[in-house]
Amino acid sequence: MKAWLQSQLEKLGVRPPAEAEAEANALPVEQTLSILLVDDTPTNLQVLTQTLQGLGHKLLAANSGKSALQVAKRAKPALILLDVMMPEMDGYQTCEQLKADPELATAAVIFCSALSEVDAKVRGFELGAVDFITKPYQAEEVVARVTTHLTIQQLAATLRQQNRALKQEIDVMLDQQKDALRRLEVALQGNSSACRLLRNAIDEFAKSDEPVLLHGSPGCGDEAVARAIHAASARRRKPFIVADCTAFMSSTHSNLFAGNAQETVEQVTKQELANGGTLYLEQVQYLPPPAQRRLAEALENRATGLDVRVIAFSSHAGQPLPEEFDPHLTQRLSRVTIRLPSLAERRDDIPLLARDMLESHARRLGKTVEGFEPASLTGLSAHRWPGNLRELEDIVVRSIVNSRGSVVKVDPQLLQGGIPLGNYRLLEKLGQGGMGEVWRAKHQYLARPAAIKLIKSEGASNREEVIERFRREAAATAQLCSPNTVTLYDFGVSDSGDFYYVMELLDGMDLETMVARFGKQPAARVAGFLIQACRSLAEAHGHGMVHRDIKPANLQACRLGVEVDVIKVLDFGIVGRRGDPEDTRLTRQAALYGTPDYMAPEMALDALTLDGKSDMYSLGASAYRLLTGERLFTADAVMQLLLKHLNEPAPLITEKANVPEPMASLIMRCLSKKPDDRPTAAELWRELEASRIQDGWTTAEARAWWEEHVPSLP
């Protein structure tokens, strides 16, 4: 953009985007701004030329209205200084013809005349002029008016360009939304009693603004039901915003809900985006406690000025929401609950659903099909469908791809149970997080149970980065042999582009779940947990690896055969190798890795110079959580929490829990602000083992605890 225009924009308080500025600067000067001077008096043309030539624009001249139209047609000027009194065709007639031409209508016209009567000016403005300059010319006035209107012209051109780009984005978004809605509508097709009851519930609850809690197994059409409620409500012309609650699991703060008036949130919240419409909370059972409190407050208090209806979905087994969920929020959400039927409860609908999916996906894949073989429809109707609608859709798509003719045959192997993935079949979703999903699976030939972690490629905005993290997690885990590190069996990429790796299937619960459900744990038991975690970390640190996300949720207490309380360290997805730029490049691109509740002070300052001592701080913070039932520090915002880790001394653990002095001293050393003051994993392991504190929790007590709280499966 030229310097003069830049200065004028800044005077108006407008700073153009860097991209637009770069684009404007890339254009030749003669293609950007042209001014047409029109007057039948040569002296007036000469005066205007001398006045404006210092501004650096391309100046064009015409001595009549007719020639002005010809020059304008060819040069497309941004601005025209047009004399009113001219023979044959005066300025008014010329302006009228200019504005009638779509290619010239956007040019700014300034009338120039010795006439000062109001009627003359009003007529000019009615014809589309933007200004009036009275003769004889005053140089300063001419320059000021020309500069101002050229600035306005440039702003208008930029706005038109942005509007065209915005319209294209909206058209693309609407087209994608229509495709998504067509796919989702399939979930509500059918005449089974379960489907009819579901549609009746949708019609009934669409009439109110009460929060709705959907509850059912994954893949049973939850988003379709939520969108149907929104579409049938008075809010249907307002936004429907989807928020995946698993994306906020590793943070004490989220961009879901507006915070305090004193809190500055740069990012627009999901709640604000949904103003006037519906906010759909997917997998609400994974919403972290701070966000649960915010949601409860938002539902009870409308002081924020936002009008949002909340629809939530939970796939939690048993009761709709976990026992440890915020009781006020549980009560508020549970007033209106819709249980979503599984596909097995809608067997009468399966042929119709399968045909609809067949038609839709065949068209998308460019295949001409007539339908299913009768035997295939019989097999589809008889299948158990643990994966619900998602599994049915996956089998239909695979059958279309494998089909050799117009009649589609479903391979019986696809109906052996579960969703196929390489040599494995996904049987049941065990969990979901910001990085992907975890499934219980089995090998098709060995029948060996396994856990599979995968990330869906569809809809991932940073897919390459996340897949790279998964690859590194698999590679890092494969190098470790400690019995306290989860064992890796296999990894790969599925036919649909989903990255996955296969681990041993663990029977137990993570320590975050343990403390949330059963409260703080005995010091002797925690000592045993810490010793085992240190065995895993000592090996990793010996290889130069730093885990970078040690927390109770990544420490799994397991039952292995007849042994109980066996700790497995999970999730090496953000592991780094100190001093290796290849292994740390993702950290340089990302803003923050790790979980703020357990993050070492130095991780917030420089994630490239970490070593095993950073994991030891996180392990100490995890021990504090297990022993006291509380987090080391709490805050409403991530930055406040990080500042506490950086500056506030760790609270004395003995003031919150009954912990033997040797163990308390070791944990407080782990929580030192200076990494050099912390013990290594091997040192903590040896010193805790030598203290014999873990002997206070006997094998008999451990087995009794497991039998009481987590009974063995029959």
Image (spheres, helix red, strand yellow):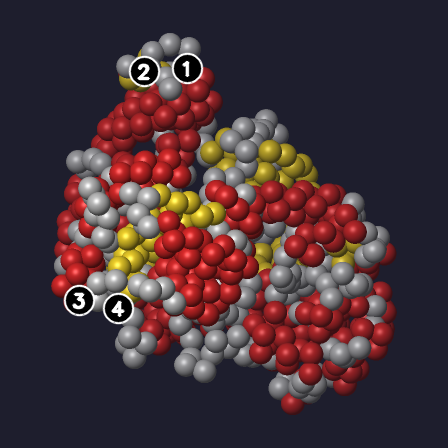
Question: Residue 463's spot in the image, x, y percent?
Answer: 56, 44
Q: Which mark is residue 117?
A: 3
Q: Measured from the top left, where is residue 590 in percent x and y?
A: 63, 57
Q: Mark 1 and 3 residues: CB-CB less than 8 Å, in contact?
A: no
Give the residue at mark 4: 307
Q: Is residue 215 above or below residue 294?
A: above
Residue under the point 40% across and 34% down: 391
> Quick check: marks 2 and 1 in contact, CB under 8 Å?
yes
Kindly report which numbered mark, 1 or 4, lies closer to the viewer in this rendering.
Answer: 4
- The first of marks 2 and 3 along the sequence is 3
Which residue type carries mark 4? Asp
Distance CA(mark 2)–CA(mark 1): 9 Å
Q: Which residue is mark 2?
A: 369
Label 3 and label 4: CA atoms lie apart by 54 Å
Q: Secondary structure at mark 2?
A: loop
Task: Name the residue: 77% across, 48% down.
Answer: 582
Binning the other alpha carbons within 10 Å of mark 4 as few (below 14), some (14 to 19) or many (20 upward) gives: some
Residue 403, numbered circle: 1
